[in-house]
Image: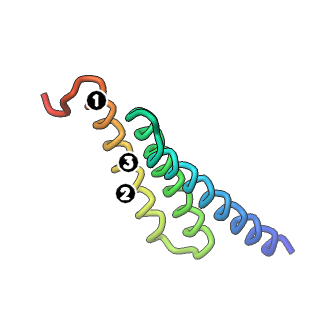
Amino acid sequence: MIVKLLIGTIFLTQILLVAAMAFAAFRVLRGPRAQDRVLGMDALYVTATMLLLTFGIRTGSILYFEAALIIALLGFVSTAALAKFLMRGEVIE
């Protein structure tokens, strides 16, 4: 009983995360300013990380957790680089 509830909850979570990714992708494509697009990309990589974590919980595979860690690290670095570029106009000083 509890296992079925857990599996159903994870499945519902995955559906909602895919919907959140669709909204974030819409903001990336239709953002009126560059700052909105950066925030959309930030939300997109965070939700992709959470989606991979839920896949890892559902399947019990460690590979998804490692992929989520790599996406989180690359997403953070790219967000910081884009923010610096938007503020100063250059990334490398």
Q: Residues within 10 Å of mark 2 (few under 14, many from 20)?
A: few
Q: Is residue 16 above or below residue 30?
A: below
Name the side, left or right, on which 1 lies relative to 92: right
Name the side, left or right, on which 43 lies relative to 14: left
Residue type, mark 2 in image = Ile
Query: Front-most of 87 and 52?
Result: 87
| Mark linked to residue 75 | 3
Q: Quadrant of the N terminus?
A: bottom right
Where residue 43 sits in the image (x, y, percent)? 50, 45
Q: In whole angstroms, how far apart are the C-alphas of marks 2 and 3?
A: 8 Å
User: Which residue lies at the image location 56% right of the left edge and 56% below the top edge?
Assistant: 22
Where residue 42 sits in the image (x, y, percent)? 45, 43
Where residue 51 sits in the image (x, y, percent)? 56, 61
Determine the image quadrant of residue 87.
Answer: top left
User: Which residue lies at the image location 66% right of the left edge and 64% below the top edge?
Assistant: 15
Q: Secondary structure at mark 3?
A: helix
Q: According to the image, label 2 marks what residue?
A: 70
Name the side, left or right, on which 3 lies relative to 35: right
Residue type, mark 3 in image = Gly
Name the side, left or right, on which 10 lies relative to 56: right
Q: In whole angstroms, how far apart are the C-alphas of marks 1 and 3?
A: 14 Å
Q: According to the image, label 1 marks what residue?
A: 84
Query: Front-most of 79 and 86?
Result: 86
CB under 8 Å between discs 1 and 2? no
Q: In whole angstroms, how far apart are the C-alphas of marks 1 and 2?
A: 21 Å
Between disc 1 and disc 2, whose residue precedes? 2
Q: Secondary structure at mark 2?
A: helix
